[in-house]
Image: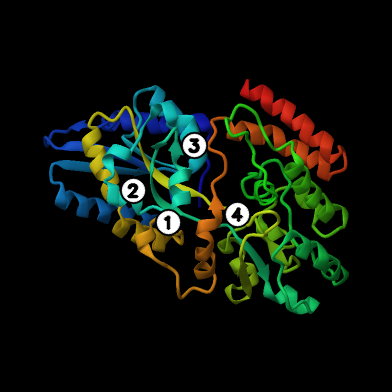
């Protein structure tokens, strides 16, 4: 069972633990070895397997680098930003830390770019969209070790029940077939509109598919109050107003098992991973499709990377560890064990025999992590309630996006 500690308790506990262990930054321990500390989070769901993976990886690394000792700490996802920020402020941060793209701008001033620590072969082996996802001002802020692709997926059982033999490829396809599903008591899709949901997986994919973006090219203003933004929000509103989605999900965030998704009453989803529905639909009934297309075909996918903090006392040692841990051989094992995809071209296909992951893996190249902007999360905070207001009929699409843009631009200064 996972226990969620309070924000303060987690942060204080982590810093205290590091202080007691004397591992805030690299240095030489009693053995005379250089020490590198790394904070990682539960990427492999099975805790014992995750710990074993890193123990084995550290052992193999130290066999090649006997003068470097690596200490890995696996911490919970909950409140990780607050804990890391507190540790950095107290000069007790790790040397290396696992970060996802929307964290990189926030910690950019504390990050040592990894370009100088990865050789040209390693850097050129990364997929282009993966490199872009960790690059700020022309510098790689982390060495990617995994990526994902959140694609469209549909429930074969629902399609069979409705007598629908073709699957949606475009927005128009989804809207056109929606009445047939509604007539048989099914929702054509689900839209999680509660403000606690991340827009990266709900609204932003539609915004990108319509040819829009969240921020202007210079990042000084927002760009979602546009024709593309209105088109995307109007599309969702058509689904809501037509009664083609469960409206309770616009204002609540229930566990999946308490939704119509788990009841096999929803045809297709674009915001979920297969692992979230497999136990309810059955793996054999999951039909993986490309991201929907409007003006563009594009979907969301995350990228996890290892970043070096500027506080690392021995950057060379930390860089050698990052280069090793982000290497093709190591990441291939890690990604396979965690059901993520490889960010490396040389890895090839990891899940060729898997009818679900193998299909999703094909679309890694048409995914994006979204905006690399320091205020990305803050902007979500003002945009999400306005989207919700439009979907609930409290505001027009134009007014909702206009009000959100004004609030967001004020945050950007």
Q: Position of residue 221 (x, y in %)?
A: 64, 28
Answer above or below: position of 353 versus 265: below
C-alpha separation, residue under disc 4 versus residue under disc 1: 23 Å
Q: Nearer the viewer, residue 79 or 355?
A: 355
Q: Which residue was labeled with disc 3? A: 103
First in sequence: mark 4 vs mark 2: 2
First in sequence: mark 4 vs mark 3: 3
C-alpha separation, residue under disc 1 versus residue under disc 2: 25 Å
Which quarter of the picture shows residue 190? bottom right
Q: Nearer the viewer, mark 4 or mark 1?
A: 4
* Colouring scheme, one of rainbow, by chain, secondary structure, one colour: rainbow
Q: Nearer the viewer, mark 3 or mark 2?
A: 2
Answer above or below: position of 177 versus 237: below
First in sequence: mark 1 vs mark 2: 1
Q: Which residue was labeled with disc 4? A: 299
C-alpha separation, residue under disc 3 versus residue under disc 2: 21 Å
Q: Which residue was labeled with disc 1? A: 44
Mark 4 touches mark 2? (CB < 8 Å): no
C-alpha separation, residue under disc 4 versus residue under disc 2: 24 Å
Q: Position of residue 138 (x, y in %)?
A: 42, 35
C-alpha separation, residue under disc 4 versus residue under disc 3: 20 Å
Answer above or below: position of 145 versus 23: below
Q: Mark number for residue 95?
A: none
Q: Identify the secondary structure beneath mark 1.
A: loop
Mark 4 touches mark 1? (CB < 8 Å): no
First in sequence: mark 4 vs mark 1: 1
Q: Which residue was labeled with disc 2? A: 123
């Amino acid at each position: 069972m996972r226990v969620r500690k309070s924000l303060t308790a987690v942060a204080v506990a982590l810093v205290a633990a590091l202080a007691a262990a004397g591992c805030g930054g690299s240095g030489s321990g009693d053995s005379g070895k250089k020490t590198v500390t790394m904070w990682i989070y539960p990427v492999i769901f099975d805790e014992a397997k995750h710990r074993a993976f890193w123990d084995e990886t550290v052992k193999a690394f130290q066999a090649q680098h006997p003068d470097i000792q690596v200490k890995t700490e696996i911490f919970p996802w909950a409140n990780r930003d607050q804990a890391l920020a507190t540790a950095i402020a107290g000069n007790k941060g790790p040397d290396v830390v696992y970060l996802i793209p929307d964290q990189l701008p926030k910690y950019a001033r504390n990050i040592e770019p990894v370009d100088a620590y990865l050789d040209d072969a390693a850097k050129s082996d990364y997929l282009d969209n993966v490199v872009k996802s960790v690059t700020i001002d022309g510098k790689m802020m982390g060495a990617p070790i995994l990526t994902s692709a959140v694609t469209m997926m549909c429930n074969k059982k629902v399609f069979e029940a409705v007598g629908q033999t073709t699957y949606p490829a475009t927005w128009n396809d989804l809207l056109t077939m929606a009445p047939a599903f509604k007539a048989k008591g099914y929702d054509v899709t689900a839209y999680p509109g509660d403000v606690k949901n991340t827009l990266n997986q709900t609204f932003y994919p539609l915004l990108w598919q319509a040819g829009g973006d969240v921020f202007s090219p210079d990042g000084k203003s927002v760009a979602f109050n546009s024709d593309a933004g209105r088109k995307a929000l109007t599309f969702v509103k058509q689904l809501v107003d037509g009664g083609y989605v469960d409206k309770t999900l616009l204002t609540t965030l229930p566990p999946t098992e308490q939704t119509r998704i788990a009841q096999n009453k929803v045809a297709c989803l674009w915001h979920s991973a297969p692992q979230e529905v497999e136990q309810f639909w059955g793996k054999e009934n999951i039909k993986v499709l490309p991201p929907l297309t409007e003006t563009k075909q594009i979907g969301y996918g995350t990228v996890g990377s290892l970043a070096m903090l500027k506080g690392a006392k021995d950057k060379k040692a930390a860089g050698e560890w990052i280069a090793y841990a982000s290497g093709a051989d190591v990441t291939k094992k890690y990604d396979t064990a965690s059901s993520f995809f490889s960010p490396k071209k040389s890895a090839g296909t990891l899940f060729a025999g898997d009818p679900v992951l193998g299909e999703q893996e094909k679309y890694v190249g048409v995914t994006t992590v979204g905006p690399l902007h320091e205020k990305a999360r803050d902007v979500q905070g003002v945009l999400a309630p306005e989207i919700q207001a439009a979907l609930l009929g409290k505001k027009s699409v134009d007014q909702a996006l206009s009000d959100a843009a004004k609030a967001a631009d004020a945050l950007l200064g």
